[in-house]
Amino acid sequence: MRVALALAVAFGLALAGPAGALESGAPSFWDPAHRPEKPDLGGLRQLRFVTEDDYPPFNFALADGQLAGFNVDLARAICEELELTCTIQRRRWDLLIPALGDNSADAIIAALAMNDENRARVDFTGPYFIMPGRFATRANSVLGPATPEVLDYQLVAVVAGSSHEAYLKTFFPKARITPFENAALARLALKDGRVNALFGDAVSLSFWLNGAEAEGCCAFSNDAYVDAKFFGDGLGIAVKKGATPLRRALDYALARLAQRGVYAELFLKYFPITPF
């Protein structure tokens, strides 16, 4: 529940309820009143990041082969904040953590979930992103905000067996949960009007809503849900086990980027319809 608690404190919201966002439209994971001191970087002159290249908008390859994406720009901003030379290399997903072990990389910024399995192998910074759940409804829907009361006995699409289905069963017990094999089929059911609402991953939903496939059919209803029990602790930058000075330096840089508005600028660049 660490991420849910942090966001609830920042936004003044209940843990089991929706999470809000700042006025800018970007989320905040850092205490704006805290002014961290720049850590001693020792003899560090270069920061070697690794990422993957097939998870847009976080990381992807441009037509010329260059790496791009939210993670890539955030890594460059971190290096600039720390006044370090920065390299960012692509790796296959299964080779990211081994790159820390063989000392061919210093940090991973690749939408790596902060779950128990990964924590056993690497250390993480604080979260720089979470993957919330969110409702979408038809643009012409007269239901109103997607609350448990509003969705009582309404058809709600969800991916079968997902954490989103489990969340609905827990907090929306009277909704007529309608499971689909995958997210594409669930979205199509909402677009065609065969269900009243859809609950799913807010990041992928935001891009669908903003893309040509949705054809303007639908819109988010209510805010994002960030309960870590269901949706995880979020994404963090991974470093080698025991690399505490580097982890603290990265946490410092992330907090400074948030305070200076750089994080919000990058977020809005890659998430024009905010998932939060």
Image (cartoon, rainbow, N blue to C red):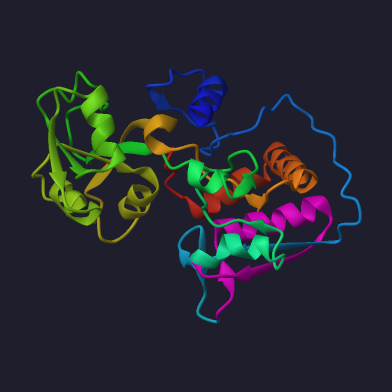
Q: Quadrant of residue 161?
A: top left
**Viewer-closest of 76 and 41:** 41
State left or right for residue 14 relative to residue 138.
right
Compared across the picture, whether 31 is left or right of 114 comes to right
Question: Residue 252 in magenta?
Answer: no
Which of 116 and 6 lies nearest the eye of the viewer? 116
For this orientation, the residue located farthest to the bottom is: 64
Q: Is residue 190 visible in this depiction of the protein? A: yes
Residue 45, position in %: x, y? 86, 61
Q: Residue at x 44, y 28 (%)?
A: 19
Compared with residue 143, is residue 45 higher up or lower down, i.e. above or below? Answer: below
Q: Is residue 73 above or below residue 41?
A: below
> Which residue is located at x 79 percent, y 29 percent?
35
- Picture quadrant of residue 213: bottom left
Q: Position of residue 219 (x, y in %)?
A: 29, 42
Q: Nearer the viewer, residue 139 or 150?
A: 150
What residue is rendered at 37% in x and 34% in y?
230
Q: Which residues are magenta?
A: 65-93
In the image, residue 75 lies in the stretch drawn in magenta: yes
